[in-house]
Image (cartoon, grey):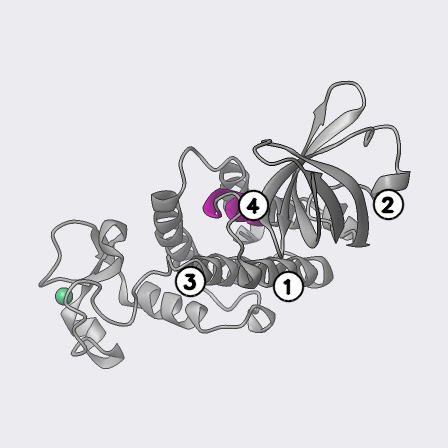
Amino acid sequence: MSSLVTIAVVLRVVNYGESDRIVTLFGRDTGRLSALARGARKSQRRFAGGLSLCSVGSAAMRERPGAELATLERFDATESHAALGADVARMAHAAYAAELVSKLCAPRQVEPAVFDWLTAFLRLLEDEGASAERLRVFEIGLLSHLGFGPVLASCAVCNGDSFGARAAADVGFRWDPDRGGAVCTACARGGRPLQPAVREALIRLAGTPLAAARAGALPVDVNRDCREALLEIINHHVTGPLKSVEFIAKLAAGPGGGA
Ligand SMILES: [Zn+2]
């Protein structure tokens, strides 16, 4: 048995048996791992603040070599993010962010920059509410931190630097996730048209800090196209459907299009 202590985000909680829970954690020092929280449905004492989705805290675990599940001995929440449950949009964005990190990061793949990105996003989401622009910044930043960031500023195939911002309108790009992002029309073999306004928005989003993302900065149709383009990149790297994405799409179709 070895002991592990890390600051961690709760990515998923499922009930197990009559009194236990299985918790998927994303530890800053451990990456993603699953742990059995014995008695978590009955005793709050060892899991102060509760093991709820997206709560952040100090996790103490023990693990046996070769065992699939660690044992969660304590979880002391430092940020319970209880207010994320206050409205449906906040909750949807939080669940989606947690699912993305869970699906894009392999088990035990240590990614401190991703941990910091996710926890900063959750803090802003709780304090300032759900914003489609910030969700786009989160998605594109997450992809970049994991080395999956789409090529946007030049052609992903020829890397042509003659396709700068000024030339973009004339040259034209297609969006081809199989080949890494934006591909100039001369190199394009597939993909679909990428509107200059969408490419420009993606370039801008990629350079925007989470805290600087402002609601209403993107026209609704540009946001929608950016969302679809990023989702294609994301789907390229995950297996199976993203459960929370349908919910997000329904929110986007509703009043305000806030997703
Ligand atoms: Zn090219």
* Image position of 189 (left or right of 9): left
**Pointer 3 residue Cβ closer than 8 Å to ligand 1:** no
Above-or-below relation of 59 to 241:
below
Residue 20 on image: x %, y % = 77, 26
Task: Judge by depth and name the residue closer to the eye, 160 or 7.
Answer: 7
Query: Is residue 98 one of those drawn in magenta?
Result: yes
Q: CA distance from mark 4 to mark 3?
A: 17 Å
Q: Earlier in the sequence, mark 3 or mark 1?
A: 1
Q: Earlier in the sequence, mark 1 or mark 4?
A: 4
Q: Are marks 1 and 4 in contact (CB under 8 Å)?
A: no
The residues colored magenta run 97-105
Residue 71 on image: x %, y % = 72, 35
Mark nearest the camera among 4 and 2 is 2
Q: Secondary structure at mark 2?
A: loop
Residue type, mark 2 in image: Ala
Is the N terminus in the top left, top right, bottom left or bottom right quadrant?
A: top right
For label 2, the residue is 48
Instruction: Give the class, few, some or many, for how many residues have Cα within 10 Å of label 2's Cα (few <14, many ≥20).
Output: some
Q: CA distance from mark 4 to mark 2?
A: 25 Å
Above-or-below relation of 168 to 187:
below
Mark nearest the camera among 2 and 1 is 2
Looking at the rendered structure, which numbered label has been put on residue 144? Answer: 3
For label 1, the residue is 120
Q: Secondary structure at mark 3?
A: helix
Residue sitting at x 50%, y 69%: 217
Q: CA distance from mark 3 to mark 1?
A: 16 Å
Mark nearest the camera among 1 and 4 is 1
Q: Earlier in the sequence, mark 4 or mark 3?
A: 4
